[in-house]
């Protein structure tokens, strides 16, 4: 099976899967972990859970946890009180199992987070987990059991996502996870780690931005060339606009975000859409979240008037509106940039749209 396809499938499941290495650093996390913790997958990978949301229990609790999964190589079930990114307390139960290699040595730890219909459902799962998890390295149906545990919803029903046909023989569940989940995650985020020193250098010395430009200029130009039917002069102009925006927002870029290449592609998309809108002279409404450009009134107000309207908003609201409607970022990504929750960003956008909508009438 295509590794990316399996990763995407796991990301659609209600339940969450977290895999750490022996040093407790996360090497894979499904999207459900974002909903549970408030941290994006990009922020979670490479960190220890205790650095982000854990570490709030007593010392004896963690001693028992590591004695069980580390020294005894047995599965562990225990109640904890973790802290979400927004500071809220998140009571939950840990279901952790060692993943062993072909020689029987523990190399990873899998943490499973199903959705439960009620406490009795959770209790039954915990009992089953302790039995099944101790046989993960030998039982052929382990993958199916994990997948279907995470596919179950709070109402007891299963999502429409079907269990994938792996199509390849794996010597163990560990080998399967390593090849289809862990390695693809490492590859997907490799750019982020490679670019970290370049980004930090550019944030300290603007002249160092030239190295990021040299690295990604061909890819950015290629993005436009493919979509503009080989229009070289226009592709060059739009590419320069992309890097001008990237340079402008360089001080606010956080290494916990997606890779810098992904970040540039977001800007590419926004620049291209603005180019099309300008040519087509489209007008848009502020009536709902699906608006995809900065507003223009039906009376044909010019962009200067729009700028005046935007300046009527508080500074943070202006920044949020520009990041959303000019640069094409999603609410969640904007929240990561300005230190707000996704819901807080949506509230700012809603209030700003209503205010500007009234002024445009």
Image: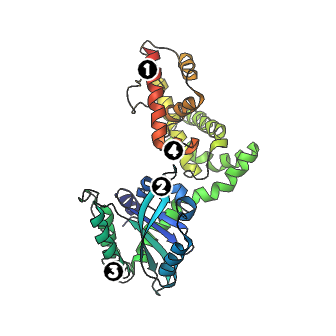
Foreground label between 2 and 3: 2
Question: Does residue 224 appear in this view?
Answer: no
Q: Residues within 10 Å of mark 2 (few under 14, many from 20)?
A: few
Mark with earlier residue (2, 3): 2
User: Real-space Cα distance between discs 4 and 2?
Assistant: 23 Å
Q: Nearer the viewer, mark 1 or mark 2?
A: 2
State left or right for residue 221 relative to residue 355. Answer: right
Tell me: 156 left or right of 91: left
Quadrant into which the N terminus falls: bottom left
- Kindly indicate the quadrant of the structure image that contains residue 233: top right
Mark positioned earlier in the residue sequence (4 or 1): 4
SS class, disc 4: helix
Query: Mark 4 or mark 2: which comes first in sequence?
Result: 2
Please give the residue where the numbered disc 3 appears in the rendered image: 131
**Residue annotated with mark 2:** 89
Residue projecting furthest to the left? 157
Observer-side mark, 3 or 4, equals 3
In the image, 156 versus 286, the foreground residue is 156
Residue 318 image point, x, y percent: 56, 29
| Mark 4 crowdedness (10 Å alpha carbons): few <14, some 14-19, many ≥20 | many
- Label disc, if present, on residue 357 of the rendered structure: 1
Query: To which residue does mark 4 refer?
Result: 333
The span from disc 3 to disc 4 (Cα, nearest Å) is: 40 Å
Chain-order first, disc 3 or disc 4: 3
- Alpha carbons under labels 1 and 3: distance apart: 59 Å
């Amino acid at each position: 099976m295509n590794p990316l396809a399996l990763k995407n499938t796991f990301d659609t499941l209600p339940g969450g899967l977290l895999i750490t290495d022996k040093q407790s650093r996360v090497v894979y996390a499904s999207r459900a972990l974002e909903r549970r913790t408030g941290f994006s997958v990009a922020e979670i990978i490479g960190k220890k859970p205790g650095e982000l949301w854990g570490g709030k229990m007593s010392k004896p609790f963690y001693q028992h946890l590591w004695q069980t999964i580390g020294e005894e190589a047995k599965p562990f079930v225990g109640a904890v009180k973790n802290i979400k990114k927004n500071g809220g307390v998140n009571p939950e139960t840990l279901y952790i199992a060692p993943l062993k290699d072909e020689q029987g040595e523990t190399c990873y730890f899998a943490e499973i987070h199903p959705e439960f219909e009620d406490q009795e459902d959770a209790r039954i799962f915990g009992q089953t987990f302790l039995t099944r998890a101790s046989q993960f390295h030998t039982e052929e149906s382990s993958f199916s059991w994990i997948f279907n545990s995470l596919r179950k919803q709070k109402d007891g029903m299963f999502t429409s996502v079907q269990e994938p046909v792996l199509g390849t023989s794996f010597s163990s569940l560990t080998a399967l996870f390593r090849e289809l989940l862990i390695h693809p995650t490492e590859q997907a985020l490799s750019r982020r780690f490679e670019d970290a020193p370049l980004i930090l250098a550019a944030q300290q010395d603007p002249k160092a931005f030239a190295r990021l430009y040299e690295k990604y200029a061909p890819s950015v130009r290629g993005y436009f060339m493919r979509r503009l039917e080989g229009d070289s002069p226009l592709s060059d102009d739009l590419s320069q606009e992309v890097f001008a925006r990237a340079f402008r927002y360089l001080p606010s870029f956080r290494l916990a975000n997606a890779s810098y290449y992904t970040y540039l592609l977001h800007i590419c998309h926004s620049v291209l859409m603005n180019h099309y809108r300008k040519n087509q002279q489209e007008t848009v409404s502020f009536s709902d979240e699906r608006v995809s450009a900065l507003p223009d009134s039906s009376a044909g107000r010019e962009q200067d008037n729009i700028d005046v309207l935007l300046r009527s908003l508080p500074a943070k609201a202006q920044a949020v509106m520009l990041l959303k409607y000019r640069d094409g970022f999603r609410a969640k990504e904007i929240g990561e940039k300005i230190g707000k929750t996704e819901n807080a960003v949506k509230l700012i956008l809603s209030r700003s749209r209503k205010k500007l909508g009234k002024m445009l009438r």
